[in-house]
């Protein structure tokens, strides 16, 4: 379609209609697309959006908004209200089954933001810098089966994760939950309590492992299969604490489709080793304290070895320098040794001369007179 006159740089907005079972065509960046049940193509005028569009027909089944500046999704934003009391400003979409809102700079999702969408089965909020999520944000979505929040929860911190737990609680029909790329250090407890959840995507997070409580929560009562878990690209710590996870993986490998991609990030002795290739002997520990000490010793082993090698190299360098100094000063050392030898010879000759002088009998002192004898003078005649 040709650009409209008077709007330089305007790009036509392709509106694609597709059923939920058929993937919709990608929507151009900074556009929004929608379609009805008969796969009709439409075009709609529009500049950069700052609120949900109001010209979507009520029979639309799919709506994609990409590259807008929605920032805040207020209550009933898609169901006839904009949160400011103007109930005629929005559009009610009772048949909408798929809503994609990626890359829209959404920071806040208020309680009831998706109220009035009773048929919505798939919601994608990925790649938005969420920092606040209402505990009742998804309360009006009784039919929601797929929720994607990939790369959307990094900025929120613990408060946002707590709000996520509250927001997930009412989604009893949820089957797919995407939480990849969110720096999560633990699995959301509410996600583990969803009875119908079939797949949980937690790739590219900060999970060091899964604890016994989380592993028990992944199992369903009555022998029912638990959800599949996508766990790759997490910094797993393959120490003593990894034994429960390894045992669970060996018994339920089919539950983790990317199990072969799980790699150890610590300790250094096991860096980049496949978790499934480890044996129990490498992870054995008597108790928690001993296990912690064992992990520290195992991690410190390569460092100590490197320190010893470095120390040996330093000593070898010092020895080499010492030998080089001796070689460069060999003439001075020889002169010093010669002078020392001559000084020692002179000293020994002095001792020898004094010994010879003391041994001459003519130079010996006269013997002393016996006790009680009387000394006589030479002229006494006696």
Image: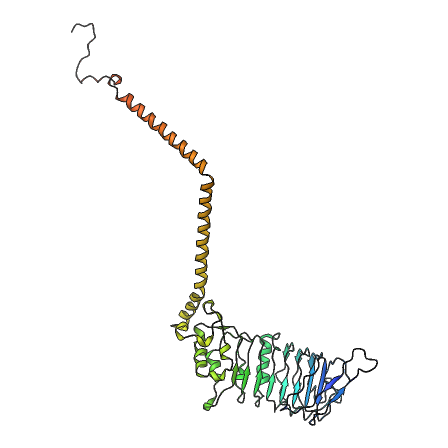
Where is residue 340 drawn, in percent x and y?
39, 32
Q: Tell me what residue is drawn at x 59 percent, y 74 percent.
A: 157
Nearer-the-camera pick, 371 or 119: 119
Q: Looking at the image, is 321 positioned above or below residue 179?
A: above
Quadrant for the C terminus, please.
top left
* Quarter of the image where one finds residue 55: bottom right
Residue 311 visible, this angle: yes
Where is residue 165 drawn, in percent x and y?
57, 82
Q: Looking at the image, is 284 positioned above or below residue 314?
A: below
Q: Tell me what residue is drawn at x 45 percent, y 77 percent.
A: 276
Where is residue 90 drawn, in percent x and y?
73, 88
Nearer-the-camera pick, 235 or 23: 23
Residue 190 visible, this angle: no
* Quarter of the image where one finds residue 240: bottom left
Colouring mode (rainbow / by chain / secondary structure / one colour):
rainbow
Q: How many marks?
A: 0
Q: Tell me what residue is drawn at x 46 percent, y 75 percent.
A: 275
Quadrant for the N terminus, please.
bottom right
Left or right of 163 in this view: 333: left
Nearer-the-camera pick, 374 or 256: 256
Nearer-the-camera pick, 122 or 5: 5
Q: Tell me what residue is drawn at x 47 percent, y 46 percent.
A: 321
Q: Looking at the image, is 145 positioned above or below residue 276?
A: below
Left or right of 334 in this view: 48: right
């Amino acid at each position: 379609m040709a650009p409209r006159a008077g709007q330089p740089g305007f790009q036509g907005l392709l509106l694609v209609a597709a059923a939920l079972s058929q993937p919709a065509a990608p929507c151009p960046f900074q556009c929004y697309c929608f379609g009805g049940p008969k796969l009709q193509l439409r075009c709609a005028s529009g500049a950069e959006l700052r609120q949900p569009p109001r010209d979507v027909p009520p029979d639309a089944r799919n709506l994609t908004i990409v590259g807008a500046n929605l920032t805040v999704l207020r209550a009933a934003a898609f169901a006839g209200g904009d949160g400011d009391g103007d109930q005629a400003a929005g559009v009610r979409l009772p048949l909408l089954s798929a809503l994609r809102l990626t890359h829209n700079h959404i920071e806040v999702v208020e309680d009831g933001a998706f109220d009035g969408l009773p048929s919505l089965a798939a919601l994608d909020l990925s790649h938005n810098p969420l920092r606040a999520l209402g505990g009742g944000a998804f309360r009006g979505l009784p039919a929601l089966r797929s929720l994607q929040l990939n790369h959307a929860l990094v900025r929120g911190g613990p408060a946002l994760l707590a709000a996520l737990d509250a927001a997930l609680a009412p989604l009893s029909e949820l089957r797919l939950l995407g939480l990849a790329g969110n720096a999560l250090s633990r699995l959301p407890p509410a996600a583990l309590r969803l009875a119908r959840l079939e797949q949980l995507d937690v790739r590219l997070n900060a999970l060091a492992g899964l604890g016994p409580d989380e592993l028990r929560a992944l199992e369903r009562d009555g022998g029912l299969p638990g959800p599949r878990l996508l766990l790759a690209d997490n910094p797993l710590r393959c120490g003593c604490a990894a034994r429960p996870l390894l045992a669970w993986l060996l018994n339920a490998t089919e539950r983790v489709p990317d199990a072969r991609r799980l790699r150890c990030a610590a300790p250094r002795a096991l860096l980049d080793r496949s978790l499934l290739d480890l044996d129990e002997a490498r992870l054995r520990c008597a108790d928690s304290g001993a296990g912690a000490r064992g992990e520290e010793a195992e991690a410190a082993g390569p460092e100590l070895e490197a320190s010893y090698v470095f120390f040996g190299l330093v000593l070898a360098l010092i020895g080499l320098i010492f030998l080089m100094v001796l070689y460069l000063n060999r003439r001075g050392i020889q002169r010093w040794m010669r002078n020392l030898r001559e000084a020692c010879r002179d000293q020994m000759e002095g001792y020898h001369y004094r010994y010879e002088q003391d041994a001459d009998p003519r130079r010996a002192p006269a013997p002393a007179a016996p006790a009680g004898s009387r000394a006589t003078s030479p002229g006494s005649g006696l």
